[in-house]
Structures are given as C-alpha cells and as structure tokens.
Image: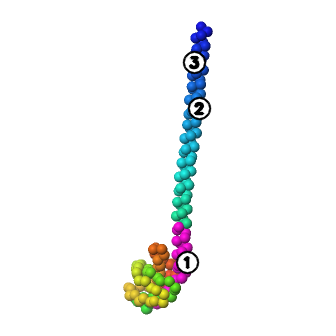
Amino acid sequence: MIKPDAENKGNVEMKNKSKKSKKGMSEIIAWILLLGFSISLAVIIFNWTRTHTEELTESTVSFVEGKLECQEIAINVVTNDDCSTITITNRGKLTIDQFAIRTFGQDYENTLIEATQLTPKQSKQLNILGSNKIEVIPIVKIKEKLVGCNDKRISNECA
C-alpha cells in the first residue's frame, strides 16, 4: 500500500507541475502577443504621422511660394462704360499665365478662363458680354501648378 500511495503522490505532483507549466506558458504567450500588437500599432501610427507631416509641410511650402509669387503680380483693368470691352495690363515683374474673368449681371454670374500669357508691361484687350460688374483674377504657374492670386483681384462696376 505504501508503494501505490507513493506512486499516486508522484503522479499528482507531476500533474500539478504540468498544469503550472501550461499555465505559465499561456501567460508568456499572452505577453508576447500583447507586446507584438503594441509594437505593430506603434509602427502604424509612426508611419501615418510621418506621411501626414510630409503632406502638411509640402502644402504649406506650396502655399507660401504662391503668396510670394503673387506679391510680384500687379494688373490694371480698364473697361468701357458697359464692360463689353476690357483691357488688362500686366504692371508687375512676373509673367501672368492666365486670367479668371468673372462677370456679374442682374440674374447671372459667369466665369471665363482666358489662357493668355501676359509678360510684364504687356496689355491684352478682350471683348465680353456686357454686365453690371466684372472681376479679373490673375493666375500664375508655380511648379507646374496654376495658382490664382485672389489678393490681386480687380473689380470694376459698370454702368
């Protein structure tokens, strides 16, 4: 009888050690999975932040370059009484690549893009439909992108 009890006691101890070692393994696996998930999440956030920062920096530089270029733009707009003919003169230091011409009537608003380049001191005469008001916005090309210089917009009221 003593022997069987000793054998049973040995088996019970082995089972307890086996349970403890299995329980310990599951805790280790849980920590490894948690650590792996945390590292993966950190890498994803880091990459997203870096990409977002690069895009923001690029757009800010582009915006500032556009503002600097537009400071060198100056135009003069002369119209006849009914605004059917306008003369646009480039008085600035840079070439203007296009113009946005907005015409306003009593019940309409129209925008025309005139793709005419004006070098400094050059003028261009255009015929448009008569309207109550016109706006001319110079557009310059900066790094192959067209940028409208809204600060240099000229508005004329017509009779």
Task: Give whichever of 133, 15 is nearer the camera.
Answer: 15
Q: Is residue 111 above or below residue 24?
A: below
Q: Which amino acid, by three-letter code, is at mark 1?
A: Leu
Residue under circle 3? Answer: 11
Residue under circle 1? Answer: 68
Q: In the structure shown, which secondary structural element does the residue marked by tag 3 occupy? A: helix
Residue under circle 2? Answer: 24
**Location of residue 39 in the rendering, given as x and y in whole percent from the top left corner:** 56, 47
**Location of residue 156 in the rendering, given as x and y in whole percent from the top left corner:** 48, 86
Tell me the mark number nearer the camera, choosing from 2 and 1. Answer: 2
Assess disc 3: are there few (<14), some (14-19) or many (≥20) residues with their C-alpha within 10 Å of its C-alpha: few
Cα distance in 3D space between marks 3 and 2: 20 Å
Query: In this rendering, does residue 77 appear at all?
Result: no
Q: Which amino acid, by three-letter code, is at mark 3?
A: Asn
Q: In the structure shown, which secondary structural element does the residue marked by tag 2 occupy? A: helix
Instruction: State which region is magenta.
Output: 58-78
Label located before the other in sequence (3 or 1): 3
For the point 55% across and 44% down, the residue is: 36
Label located before the other in sequence (3 or 2): 3
Q: Are marks 3 and 2 in contact (CB under 8 Å)?
A: no
